[in-house]
């Protein structure tokens, strides 16, 4: 039982009218892992998550969550999962603390609400009605409601959207702790750094399909090369530098005095470049190694044009 | 055990339903507009029309005519208007959706909503009864018939309120529920005797759930009638139709 994936989505299709929001999506989430589903707006992230939560019935394909069918076995599944919707979900007149306490009462062995209130910095607004909370406070309350029942699997739909940097840190810390304590977590996000920082596995979704998948390291490896940039005297002769570097390297003076070296950036390459600079009496300024980030990967895969 | 170590599970059903009923009731009693509708309006109407002869209520004490009508209005204001508006906005704000992913089954949520409606109605009935007695009301008839009418009336109005909340937009529900409240207040035998209306209109109005409830309550409480079978029958038909349609067409999102 424990060896089956926490979430298994095979060939999922979900249409709204003629348009397929999800179009043959495959997803497998290992138990105890933290999976980030990344994608542009309209990629099908929320539809996929909401199908896993039992809100949508698949038009084709199968979805199993903790081995259960989220639609027909919802009653068995619901007590075991935690859900954070993208927005809303709370009575406008309910106070933050009141709503969390209430959610706790629906579970057999909840976490003390006071502990979550403190952890998420909701103490100062515990008696404020939901409709008067800031967007960030509403997000944090929704997160607290998702985890208060000690679920074994949580779905977080854009948990840090609209949060200020401090609140974002607090959310990240909590999500990391969930993982450390053995809770399987699936989160959707627009933020590359969030996926890079938190996730064991990243799934990039676009047009209702998975277009790339792997650990952040796997995704960042390969494809475009890493680069090293430095500034120095304009008009340096780069030919002698290229001779010293591995044959697949490239070097260019992008603007006068600003150089870029592309290739396999490792300590050896850095040493070669700096010793070449020393030979030429150049003090390299603003020397910087640039690795490929998840953002680069994401933009390469999904294109850079804005989408509506 | 660390903080988040999984220990999932639903609370026992009675605890969930109890907690949900308490929360729903607090939300209702905390909402100013709801209190205006369910408490202030029926109370003011009872006191005003009992004290001042604005409407000809026929022979007998005015309060004996008005008290049963305002008990009917109290039921309608809570089970229909209030419940429709609150549920419509809960649907709009994703409250119903979020609760749909919680361990609370949907039927248990509906049970809690009914529980909260009943708690509110008991508060209304106690308040209106005390005021009416202070105004000299002398109720007749069988308490069993009264309770039966109130319960069936609640079922009929709940079905219609939930049907509206589960199918229309929240704003449309707000407008329509208030309009229906106003129309039925005037045309449902609450404060205006139905015999003031022309015969054809009257026979149509007689079939409304509010007329059956106010008429049935008046028959028992004012005139000491036995079981008002025809009014109970009308309310049963509305309850079956309303709850059936709500169950069939209610959309949770």
Image (cartoon, coloured by chain):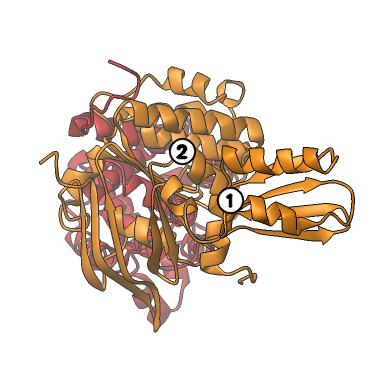
Chain colours: A orange, B red
Residue A253 falls left or right of residue A305: right
Q: Please report the residue visible at 70 percent of the width from the left and 44 percent of the height from the top.
A: A273
Whether marks 1 and 2 lie on the same chain: no
Q: In this view, does B155 lie above or below B71?
A: below
Q: Of the residues tagged 1 and 2, which is closer to the observer?
A: 2
The residue at the point 38 percent across, 41 percent down is A200
Q: Is residue B44 left or right of residue A272?
A: left
Q: Which residue is drawn at 29% across and 58% down?
A: A27
- Pointer 2 residue: A198
Q: Which of the labelled discs sits on residue A214, or is there none? A: none
On the question of residue B74 being in view, the answer is no
Q: Position of residue A149 (x, y in %)?
A: 31, 30
Q: Mark 1 points at which residue?
A: B53
**Element type where label 2 sits in the image:** helix
Q: Do the residues labelled 1 and 2 touch (CB within 8 Å)?
A: no
Residue at screen point 41% across, 35% down: A145
Tell me the element at label 1. Answer: loop
Query: A220 or B26, which is in the foreground?
Result: A220
Identify the image quadrant of the N terminus of chain A: top left
């Amino acid at each position: 039982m424990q060896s089956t994936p926490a979430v298994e989505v095979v060939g999922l299709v979900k249409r709204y009218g003629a348009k397929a929001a999800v179009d043959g999506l495959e997803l497998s989430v290992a138990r105890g892992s933290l999976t980030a589903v990344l994608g542009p707006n309209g990629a099908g992230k929320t539809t996929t998550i909401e199908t896993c939560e039992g809100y949508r019935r698949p038009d084709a394909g199968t979805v199993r969550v903790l081995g259960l069918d989220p639609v027909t076995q919802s009653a068995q599944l619901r007590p075991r999962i935690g859900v954070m919707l993208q927005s809303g979900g709370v009575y406008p007149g309910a106070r933050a603390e009141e709503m969390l306490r209430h959610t706790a009462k629906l579970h057999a062995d909840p976490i003390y609400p006071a502990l979550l209130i403190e952890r998420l910095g909701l103490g100062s607004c515990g008696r404020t009605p939901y409709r008067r909370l800031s967007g960030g406070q509403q997000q944090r309350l929704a997160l607290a409601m998702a985890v208060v029942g000690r679920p074994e699997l949580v779905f977080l739909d854009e948990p840090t959207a609209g949060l200020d940097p401090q609140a974002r840190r607090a959310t990240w810390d909590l999500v990391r702790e969930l993982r450390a304590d053995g809770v399987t977590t699936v989160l959707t996000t627009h933020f590359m750094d969030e996926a890079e920082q938190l996730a064991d596995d990243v799934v990039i979704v676009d047009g209702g399909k998975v277009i790339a998948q792997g650990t952040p390291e796997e995704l960042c490896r390969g494809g475009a090369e890493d680069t090293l940039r430095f500034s120095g005297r304009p008009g340096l002769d780069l030919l002698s530098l290229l001779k010293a570097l591995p044959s697949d390297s490239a070097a260019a003076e992008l603007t006068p005095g600003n150089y870029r070296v592309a290739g396999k950036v490792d300590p050896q390459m850095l040493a070669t470049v700096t010793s070449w600079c020393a030979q030429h009496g150049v003090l390299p300024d603003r020397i910087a190694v640039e690795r490929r980030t998840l953002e680069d990967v994401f933009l390469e895969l999904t294109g850079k044009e804005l989408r509506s | 055990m660390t903080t988040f170590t999984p220990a999932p599970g639903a609370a026992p059903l009675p605890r969930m339903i109890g907690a949900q009923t308490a929360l729903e009731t607090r939300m209702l009693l905390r909402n100013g507009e709801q209190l205006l509708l369910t408490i202030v309006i029926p109370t003011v109407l009872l006191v005003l029309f009992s004290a001042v002869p604005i409407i000809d209520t026929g022979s007998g004490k005015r309060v004996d005519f008005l008290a049963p009508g305002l008990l009917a209005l109290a039921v309608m204001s809570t089970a229909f208007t209030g419940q429709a508006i609150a549920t419509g906005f809960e649907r709009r704000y994703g409250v119903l959706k979020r609760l749909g992913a919680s361990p609370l089954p949907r039927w248990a949520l509906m049970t809690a909503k009914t529980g909260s409606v009943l708690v509110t109605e008991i508060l209304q009935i106690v308040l209106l009864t005390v005021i009416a007695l202070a105004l000299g009301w002398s109720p007749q008839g069988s308490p069993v018939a009264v309770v039966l009418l109130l319960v069936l009336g609640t079922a009929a109005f709940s079905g219609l309120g939930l049907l509206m909340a589960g199918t229309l937009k929240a704003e449309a529900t707000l407008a329509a529920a208030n309009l229906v409240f106003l129309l039925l207040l005037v045309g449902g035998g609450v404060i205006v005797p139905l015999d003031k209306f022309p015969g054809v209109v009257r026979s149509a109005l007689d079939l409304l759930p509010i007329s059956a409830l106010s008429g049935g309550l008046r028959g028992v409480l004012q005139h000491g009638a036995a079981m008002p079978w025809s009014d109970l029958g009308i309310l049963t038909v509305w309850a079956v139709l309303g709850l059936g349609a709500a169950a069939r067409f209610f959309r949770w999102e």
